[in-house]
Image: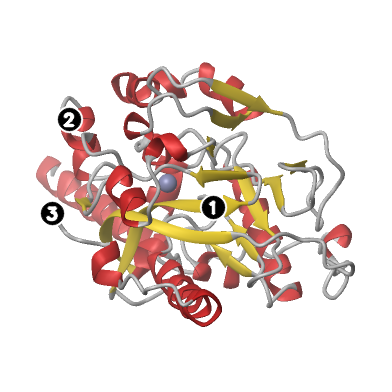
Amino acid sequence: MKRQYWLTMGGVVLGLGAGIVFRSFLPQSLLHGERKDDLEESLVGSLDPQGTLPEIEVTFLRCGSVQVPECIAVRGSLSARPLTISYSAVLIKHPQATFLYDTGLCADIELFLMDQALFFKQTLGRFDFEQSISNLLHTYGVQASDLDFAVISHLHWDHVSGIPDLPGIPLRINRVEYDAASQGLFERNRGLVRRLLSNNPVQLLDFTGDPYEGFPCSHDLFGDGSIILVPLPGHTAGQMGMFINRSNGARLFLLADAAWLADNYVRPATMHPVLWSLVTSDDAIAKQTLVDLYYFSRQHPEIAMIGMHDAQLQDAFMTVEQNRRIIHTQETPIDADARRRVK
Ligand SMILES: [Zn+2]
């Protein structure tokens, strides 16, 4: 009798477990409620009527990557085809400053990760190292000491992992993000983020600027309308996206980790819920940010919206950008293999 009971219970638990796992791969509708009114206004055609925006060069620097099945990266996808998730920084040359958005990976990143727990190393900390941020900067004729500062989109380890290669470079961080990280994120994973931040000076940013493109506040980095930071909360408390408005190329919106891939905001869809819960600090706010990006992408198809792990879009952008530079400046092309020399 007892044996029969436990067999039945085991069957029920297994069935429930299989059902939960199956459901976790099914689509989840994020679009309920009203569309945000303030996202409806479009600035197309009125961005630079006087032609005052500067020329800005934008270069994605890919330091590492990992292959992830599409159904894990995008909830609701039924495909298991491998997608490349990149670990990247962006080099931005503005007339007033040369700086990074996020920092990629330093040459010693494997040493920093050596003492991490096996679970972390096999999940969030698993990637193929390709090239250090210092090597990549050198490829593009920039020394780390040439950088004026680095804007840190948020304080997850994979966005501050290049800092040890950038000694003394000031780090510009949203004050909200820094304060939230002080409550625990700095010390998580045996102090990994705190150690990666090294002793670089920190310059805290406040979002005291006007609403911008439907986002409730902003920070204009140079006061010229070219580099506008906006809050993209949820993934972390103070994550920052960056608009790049320029006279010499496409308008860009860097999304940090608000969306891993374009599919996340096009559908919209989170990543698989298990992964999502591991990396998201506020589920409801992060989903709202995704929904905001969904509406924004429909209103602004002319703007390239690129996440910091979206290898496909980053490669596509760099192909277009290099062709533009060849045409306009006769710059010698640096092909994708050189950009990504595997160690
Ligand atoms: Zn990330």
CA gap, disc 1 to disc 2?
Answer: 28 Å
**Where, quadrant-wise, is the N terminus in this rendering?**
top left
Residue with the mark numbered 3: 343
Label 3 sits on what residue type? Lys
Which label sits in the foreground, 1 or 2?
1
Residue with the mark numbered 2: 111
Sequence order check: which comes first, mark 1 or mark 2?
A: 1
- Is 290 located above or below residue 145 in the figure? below
Which label sits in the foreground, 1 or 3?
1
Residue neighbourhood size for the residue with mark 2, other residues' Cα within 10 Å, grouped as few (<14), some (14–19), many (≥20):
few
Residue neighbourhood size for the residue with mark 1, other residues' Cα within 10 Å, grouped as few (<14), some (14–19), many (≥20):
many
**Where, quadrant-wise, is the C terminus in this rendering?**
bottom left
> Residue 180 appears in which quarter of the rendering?
top right
Q: Residue at x 71, y 41 (%)?
A: 221
How far from the left and from the top, in percent, is residue 255? 57, 55
- Is 159 located above or below residue 45 in the figure? above
Answer with left or right where residue 317 lies relative to residue 282: left
Answer with left or right where residue 58 lies relative to residue 12: right
Q: Residue at x 61, y 24 (%)?
A: 203
Q: Secondary structure at mark 3?
A: loop
Q: Secondary structure at mark 1?
A: strand
CA gap, disc 1 to disc 3?
Answer: 25 Å
Q: Nearer the viewer, residue 326 or 168?
A: 326
Asked whether disc 1 touches disc 2, contact meaning CB atoms under 8 Å apart, the reply is: no
Residue with the mark numbered 1: 92
What number of labels is visible? Answer: 3
Numbered circle sitting on residue 332: none
